[in-house]
Amino acid sequence: MTPIRLGITGGIGSGKSVVARVLQTLGIPVFDCDAESKRLTVVHPLIRQQLVALVGPEVYQGNTLNKPFLAHYLFSSPEHVQQVNGIIHPVLKEYFLQWVSKQSTQFVAIESAILFEAGYDDVVDSVITVSAPLEVRIARAMQRDGATRSAIEERIRQQMDDEEKRRRSQFVIVNDGEAPVIPQVLEIINTLSQK
């Protein structure tokens, strides 16, 4: 039996990780795109080779990624972000599909802030966007990352618009600090279980 694949996305500070933890508590394995992309960027030979060819050997310092060097390259141009994503995400997508094939649960999930931008919506059955008011998202992200308001606002501007994510999703979970998240997750699981 092939598991039903759920995509979890949402803007910075929306609470994607909260929803992922609820799913894990329900026994649903969650593939963390952010963590896996960081890991594969360091250990995968094809990614290493292509990143070195694109930005130079300084992108690695031994067995670690030179994050400030890569960040400087990424933030200098939107085209650079597309180039780097074009190296990492096809490998990560393939790795996700291999991971899915090893799961024996009814559902699996993939958590990614850039689910649509990276094309992961092609390999999931339903997308759940986690949504919260802008001010709540900014406050959460500032507290979590110890970042300034302007830095968080800049990161939000670089992401797909929240409304666009909601429009392209099959389900929306409101995580505004008032609406309980767990009943919303359970309702989605129950709906999909009955299909």
Image: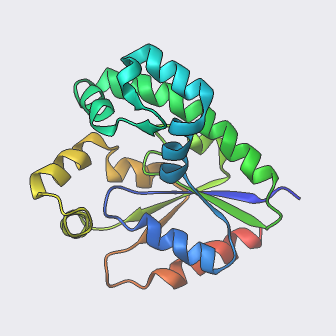
Residue drawn at (61%, 28%), measured in percent from left and top? Answer: 45
Q: Which residue in the rendered view is the most extreme toward the top?
A: 53
Residue drawn at (38%, 17%), measured in percent from left and top? Answer: 56
Q: Nearer the viewer, residue 57 or 85?
A: 57
Q: Nearer the viewer, residue 132 or 49?
A: 49
Residue drawn at (53%, 74%), measured in percent from left and top? Answer: 21
Left or right of 39 on screen, residue 106: right
Q: How many marks?
A: 0
What quarter of the picture does the C terminus occupy? bottom right
Question: Eyeballing the image, is 136 above or below 126?
Answer: below
Q: How is the image coloured?
A: rainbow
Q: Quadrant of residue 186?
A: bottom right
Left or right of 134 on screen, residue 55: right
In this rendering, does residue 119 appear at all? no
Q: Quadrant of residue 67?
A: top left
Question: Eyeballing the image, is 50 above or below 62?
Answer: above
Q: Residue 72, image x and y in percent?
A: 24, 30
Left or right of 139 on screen, residue 36: right
Residue drawn at (41%, 30%), measured in percent from left and top? Answer: 60
Q: Quadrant of residue 83?
A: top left
What quarter of the picture does the N terminus occupy? bottom right
Left or right of 71 on screen, residue 109: right
Q: Residue 15, image x and y in percent?
A: 39, 68
In this rendering, does residue 42 appear at all? yes
Q: Residue 149, image x and y in percent?
A: 11, 58
Q: Residue 95, image x and y in percent?
A: 68, 41
Q: Nearer the viewer, residue 117 or 93?
A: 93
Q: Which residue in the rendered view is the most extreme toward the front?
A: 62
Q: Nearer the viewer, residue 67 or 80?
A: 67
